[in-house]
Amino acid sequence: MTNPMGTVLDEAGRVGRHLAQSLRLMVGLPDYGAYLAHMQATHPAVEPMSYEAFFRERQAARYGAQGRMSRCC
């Protein structure tokens, strides 16, 4: 027989992780864990970037190479 309380806690943890990931994406924080999982699954022979390099690359992709936000008005 399975422990229903353990199942509920496992599900709550899973929901919490997805909520945290969604909130990070909403405010523009890159998900390094998802990047590492992607690299391991699809490019196992390639050394992944460090967290710092990953963060800088994501910021440059979001704001441009100068690190400044462009203005439309």
Image (spheres, rainbow, N blue to C red):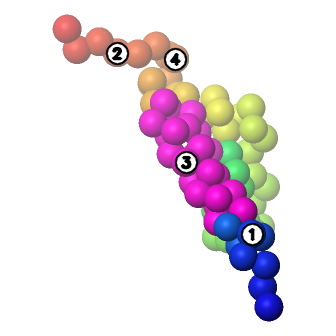
Characterize the magenta stretch by its predominant secondary structure: helix
In the image, residue 1 lies in the stretch drawn in magenta: no
- x and y, in percent, of residue 49 in the image: 74, 45
Q: Which mark is residue 44?
A: none
Q: Is residue 26 above or below residue 66?
A: below
> What residue is at 62 percent from the left and 51 percent from the top?
16
Q: Which mark is residue 5?
A: 1
Q: Amino acid at mark 3?
A: Leu
Work out whether residue 50 or residue 65 is closer to the camera in this orientation and state it: 50
- Structural distance between the alpha carbons of marks 1 and 3: 21 Å
Which residue is identified by label 2?
70
* Crowd around label 2: few <14 · some 14–19 · many ≥20 (10 Å): few
Amino acid type at mark 2: Ser
How would you rate the neighbour count of disc 4 (Cα within 10 Å): few for under 14, some for 14-19, many for 20 or more?
A: few
Locate the C terminus by quadrant. Answer: top left
At 78% from the left and 41% from the top, the residue drawn is 50
Q: Nearer the viewer, mark 3 or mark 4?
A: 3
Query: Label 2 near label 4: C-beta < 8 Å?
Result: no
Disc nearer the start of the sequence (2/1):
1
Measured in 3D between alpha carbons, the distance from the residue under mark 4 to the one under mark 2, in whole angstroms, is 9 Å
